[in-house]
Image (cartoon, rainbow, N blue to C red):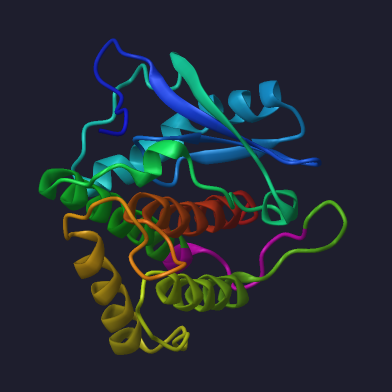
Amino acid sequence: MAPKARSGAKTAVYLECGQKKIFACALGWPGWCRSGKTEEEALERLAEYAPRYAVAAEAAGVRFPASAGRGIDVVERVEGNATTDFGAPGVAATSDAERVTAAQAKRLAALVQAAWTVLDRVAATAPAELRKGPRGGGRDRDKMVKHVLDAESAYAGKIGLKHRGPAIDDRDAITAMREDILALLRKPSDGGPLRPGGWSARYAARRFAWHALDHAWEMEDRSD
């Protein structure tokens, strides 16, 4: 069973170590991943974002320990790749190949759905034009939302589903794609890829949730 944070327990984390970036990802909490130039920086940022991740856990109806960000235990290090250095967690942890029970599958799907809920809430109140980054870059709100939807379409292919990236105002298409993804993630699995050469359920949940939350938090930060 993949480690999960419990009251008084440490949060199990794995580090994905690229040449330029390192990701720290909480194994029991899909989407709670942050990066830095060093292991220390990545872990500090992960802890810093615990209160923000707690919002997603609340939306999922999953109890998130108040101590989750204070007690972090690095249980594995994996070698990163070009995806890591580009800015996304791109390598699965060993425990991502473990069997997923019915209860665990339900929890994974709930946290992925909550990440989408957080993104949708933030996008609904964010200004159309977001504050630019330090170098004048960054997508505005609608382009960011479309980027996430297109990525979800690509990610869906990694678990054997086919959906075109929907338009940002096509709620029926968005709902259909996300419901298909959630229906698959809710099913117990043996921990192997959900399609040949694709992603396991645990890893897929992490990528879906991370991408939605990463851009939700970016949108919040650039709405000031």
Q: Image check: 193 left or right of 211? A: left
Q: Residue furthest right?
A: 135
Q: Image check: 174 left or right of 24? A: left
Residue 98 in the magenta stretch? The answer is no
Q: Residue at x 15, y 45 (%)?
A: 101
Q: Position of residue 167 (x, y in %)?
A: 47, 88
Residue 127 in the magenta stretch? The answer is yes
> Which stretch is magenta?
123-132
In this view, the residue in front, 196 or 41, is: 196
Q: Position of residue 114 (x, y in %)?
A: 30, 54
Residue 199 vertical placement versus 128 (above, below): above
Quarter-of-image position of residue 132 = bottom right
Residue 113 vertical placement versus 162 (above, below): above
Q: Image check: 140 left or right of 1? A: right
Q: Position of residue 199 (x, y in %)?
A: 42, 61
Quarter-of-image position of residue 39 = top right
Quarter of the N terminus within the rendering: top left
Tell me which secondary structure the magenta stretch mostly adopts. Answer: loop
Residue 143 vertical placement versus 106 (above, below): below
Q: Residue furthest left?
A: 102
Q: Position of residue 209 (x, y in %)?
A: 42, 54
In this view, the residue in front, 212 or 99, is: 99
Q: Residue at x 45, y 89 (%)?
A: 164
